[in-house]
Image (cartoon, rainbow, N blue to C red):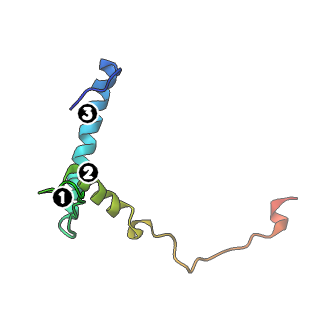
Amino acid sequence: METQRQWSDRAIACSTPVILALYSLVALAAKQLLEHDILMTRHAAWRAKDSPTFSDTIAFVRRSLWSEENYKGSGSHCDRVKIPRALFGA
């Protein structure tokens, strides 16, 4: 892990565990997702990759989290109740 320029030792000491924790969470989420899906590797025209990189893994987990399935709103049949204006006390 590299240190950031102009960061204090205290800031680095605080941020390093968080970075490692996020790395671990992404790796664990990807491992669980790989049971049901395939990790697609993004390729550049000038360089072929033998295996997925961590950047591919982050994109894989992000796509899963941002999928429509995870962001379903309430159903189309919502029960609405109109409140009479008199109750607003105008």
- Mark 1 or mark 2: whose residue is earlier in sequence: 1
The answer for how far apart the CA atoms under marks 1 and 2 are is: 15 Å
Q: Which residue is pictured at 73% across the width and 73% down the height?
A: 82
Q: Which mark is residue 55?
A: 2
The picture quadrant where one finds residue 34 is bottom left
Q: Are marks 1 and 3 in contact (CB under 8 Å)?
A: no
Q: Position of residue 66 (x, y in %)?
A: 39, 62
* Kind of residue sitting beneath label 3: Pro
Closer to the camera in the image, 41 or 83: 41
Residue identified by numbered label 1? 31
Tell me: residue 14, above or below residue 62: above
- Mark 3 or mark 2: whose residue is earlier in sequence: 3
Tell me: residue 55, above or below residue 2: below
Q: Which residue is pictured at 34% across the width and 24% down the height?
A: 11
* Kind of residue sitting beneath label 2: Ser
Q: Which mark is residue 22?
A: none
Badge 3 element = helix
